[in-house]
Image (cartoon, rainbow, N blue to C red):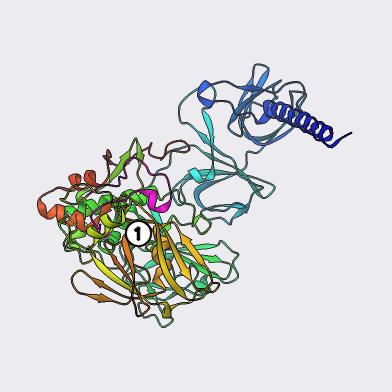
């Protein structure tokens, strides 16, 4: 057989194998894994060829000669019924399409979802329990129907510290989660970081008034030590420090206060290698301490109210964030989320929070990702600076008094960035700035010293979308604004702001809206504008709009397009599919 015929034969064999594979996959999927459109209200039927045990399914109905079970998002029907009329979580044994046995799992632990990982689930007041693989979550409607109205979600639909659930347990393991009510968001859990670390080697706390530790009374100013309280306890064990009307303080080993007082409760949690500190408090109180930490208190009152709505919206939208789910927290207290408790609350910001109580921003019925930043260079951006698809409410547009310009062009951008074009942000010291970089300040571990920078791509709003950093022995290209800013931070000598202030304490350049010019002395000068990512609301712009007479609603709808301002108290439908709040 010649080479050409051999190749032809191999092609035919491969085609036959492919066809057989497709047919077998179709048969398997049709038997069990096929996903039925829930809205069509159709059920899949076990045919006579199917035999096996379905683990941790939810029995919806068990009468009239058939059993209906929910498994992996689909309702399945099997012939025969069991003697018991049990409905709920069970292992279902099927033989040739008929029910053989139900292994009911009625045992459960009821309480607040405290933490979870890929391998464990924890209910508040209990130790974490192991689970085999992805744990199913069954959401049971409170509607009165003959057959329970149950749908399947995932653990990430639930809210740490808020969701009231039943954890189904068998043989010491977590098998499934059943939720009978909508998420009721009352509190938020903030992980208080230890600098850049999550863990503390020990935690010392005291209260200015009498408090309780897991219900045991502790006198005012008595020092509480995490290591003593949790000595000999397993990983995941928690104690709650609660004070009715006092405040809690982080202290050193001698009991000297290291922080201002915190409202709400402290949760001390034992983890491998140390302890985690969580502050749980009502969302409105959380916003009271975010507002003065994120916006200067002397800004216009309408800007403060707009910022309060942004902070509250952001807080609600992060309730499902699972970054800290294993520690039992929703978010942390740093700029990675919102700066919390960096300063004391004050009367004007407390009033701004109270005057907008519960108000949040939604788009097409869902909470928005409420991004905000310090200063615009004159044009706003969307998520293209993070190389991501952008929602309709985030617009890249001109916020100056001048006509629209395409700032992706080099000459056009140069004329724009070297002048202070009139805009709402004109009075910000960050509106225009000059940064000086020195190759002497840093070495790339692989490519050596910095040689030059090349702007590969710029957006129409003037922000760099791709920057190549050239070194002695190679180069790196960065395509996200935060990566660009921090990559250059290690070489940052100083930044001169528009008001003449010179700063040499920045860890990144103020924004990715800049042009590059190499100097004869070996330094590189960046001429730029703005402070932050440029997405959403500019805080300095909001301040100027407030001083101009705009109200907080007008400020928010200027920066976030086609949004609705809604009272978030009791809202139930802002997270789309999956378990609702």
Q: Which image quarter holds the C terminus?
A: top left
Q: Is 280 covered by the magenta stretch? A: no
Dot 1: within a 10 Å radius of its alpha carbon, few (fewer than 14), some, or many (20 or more) residues? Answer: some
Quadrant of the image occupied by residue 516: bottom left
Residue that lies at the very extreme toward the bottom in this rendered image: 254
Question: Quick check: can you spot residue 279?
Answer: no
Closer-to-camera residue (360/95): 360
Report whether 65 appears left or right of 377: right
Q: Nearer the viewer, residue 359 or 12?
A: 12
Q: Give residue 77's position: percent from left, percent from top.
A: 65, 22
Left or right of 110 in this view: 573: left
* Outermost right residue: 1
Q: Position of residue 103 (x, y in %)?
A: 70, 35
Q: Nearer the viewer, residue 547 or 178?
A: 547
Magenta part mainly helix, strand or loop? loop
Q: Position of residue 20 (x, y in %)?
A: 76, 28
2 horizontally vs 542: left or right: right
Residue 211, image x, y percentages: 38, 66
The residue labelled by disc 1 is: 338
Q: Can you see residue 412?
A: yes
- Name the residue at 72% across, 21% down: 47
Locate the N terminus by quadrant.
top right
Residue at 23% across, 57% down: 416
Residue at horizontal 15%, vertical 56%?
422
> Looking at the rendering, which quadrant does residue 347 occupy?
bottom left
Residue drawn at point x = 31 percent, y = 42 percent: 393
- Total count of labels: 1
The range drawn in magenta is 374-398
Question: Secondary structure beneath disc 1?
Answer: loop
Residue 384 in the magenta stretch? The answer is yes
Nearer the observer, 171 or 352: 352
Residue at the extreme top of the image, as rendered: 64
């Amino acid at each position: 057989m010649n080479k050409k015929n051999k190749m032809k034969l191999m092609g035919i064999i491969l085609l036959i194998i492919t066809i057989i594979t497709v047919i077998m996959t179709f048969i398997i999927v049709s038997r069990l894994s096929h996903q039925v459109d829930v809205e069509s209200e159709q059920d899949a039927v076990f045919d006579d060829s199917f035999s096996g045990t379905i683990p941790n399914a939810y029995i919806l109905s068990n009468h009239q000669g058939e059993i209906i079970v929910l498994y992996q998002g689909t309702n399945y029907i099997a012939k025969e019924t069991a003697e018991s009329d049990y409905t709920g979580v069970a292992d279902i044994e099927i033989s040739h399409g008929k029910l053989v046995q139900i292994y009911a799992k009625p045992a459960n632990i009821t309480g607040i979802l405290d933490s979870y990982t890929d391998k464990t689930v924890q209910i508040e007041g209990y130790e974490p329990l192991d689970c085999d693989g992805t744990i199913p979550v069954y959401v049971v409607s409170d509607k009165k129907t003959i057959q329970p109205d149950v749908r399947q979600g995932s653990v990430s639909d639930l809210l740490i510290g808020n969701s009231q659930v039943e954890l189904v347990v068998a043989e010491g393991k977590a098998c499934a989660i059943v939720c009978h009510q909508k998420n009721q968001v009352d509190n938020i859990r903030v992980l208080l970081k230890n600098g850049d670390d999550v863990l503390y080697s020990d935690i010392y706390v005291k209260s200015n008034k009498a408090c309780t530790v897991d219900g045991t009374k502790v006198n005012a100013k008595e020092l509480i030590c995490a290591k003593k309280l949790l000595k000999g306890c397993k990983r995941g064990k928690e104690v709650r420090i609660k004070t009715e009307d006092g405040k809690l303080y982080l202290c050193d080993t001698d009991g000297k206060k290291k922080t201002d007082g915190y409202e709400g409760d402290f949760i001390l949690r034992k983890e491998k290698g140390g302890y985690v500190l969580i502050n749980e408090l009502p969302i409105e109180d959380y916003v009271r301490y975010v507002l003065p930490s994120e916006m200067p208190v002397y800004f216009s009152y309408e800007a403060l109210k707009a910022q309060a709505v942004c902070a509250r919206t952001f807080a609600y939208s992060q309730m499902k964030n699972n970054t800290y789910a294993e520690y039992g927290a929703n978010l942390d207290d740093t700029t990675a989320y919102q700066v919390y408790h960096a300063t004391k609350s004050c009367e004007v910001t407390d009033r701004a929070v109270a005057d907008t109580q519960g108000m949040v921003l939604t788009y097409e019925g869902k909470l928005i990702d409420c991004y905000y930043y310090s200063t615009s260079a004159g044009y706003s951006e969307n998520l293209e600076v993070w190389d991501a698809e952008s929602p309709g409410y985030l617009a890249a547009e001109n916020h100056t008094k001048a006509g629209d310009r395409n700032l992706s062009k080099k000459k056009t951008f140069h004329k724009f960035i070297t002048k202070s074009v009139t805009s709402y942000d004109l009075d910000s010291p960050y509106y225009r700035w000059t940064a000086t970089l020195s190759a002497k300040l840093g070495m790339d571990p692989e490519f050596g010293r910095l040689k030059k920078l090349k702007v590969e791509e710029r957006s129409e709003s003037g922000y760099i979308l791709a920057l190549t950093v050239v070194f002695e022995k190679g180069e790196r290209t960065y395509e996200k604004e935060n990566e660009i800013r921090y990559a250059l931070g290690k070489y940052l000598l100083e930044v001169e702001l528009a008001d003449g202030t010179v700063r040499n304490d920045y860890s990144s350049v103020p924004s990715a809206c800049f042009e590059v010019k190499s100097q004869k002395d070996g330094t590189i000068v960046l001429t730029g504008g703005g402070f932050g990512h440029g997405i959403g609301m500019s805080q300095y712009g909001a301040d100027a709009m407030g001083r101009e007479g705009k109200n907080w609603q007008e400020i928010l709808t200027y920066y976030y397009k086609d949004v609705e301002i809604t009272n978030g108290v009791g809202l139930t439908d802002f997270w789309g599919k999956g378990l609702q709040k």
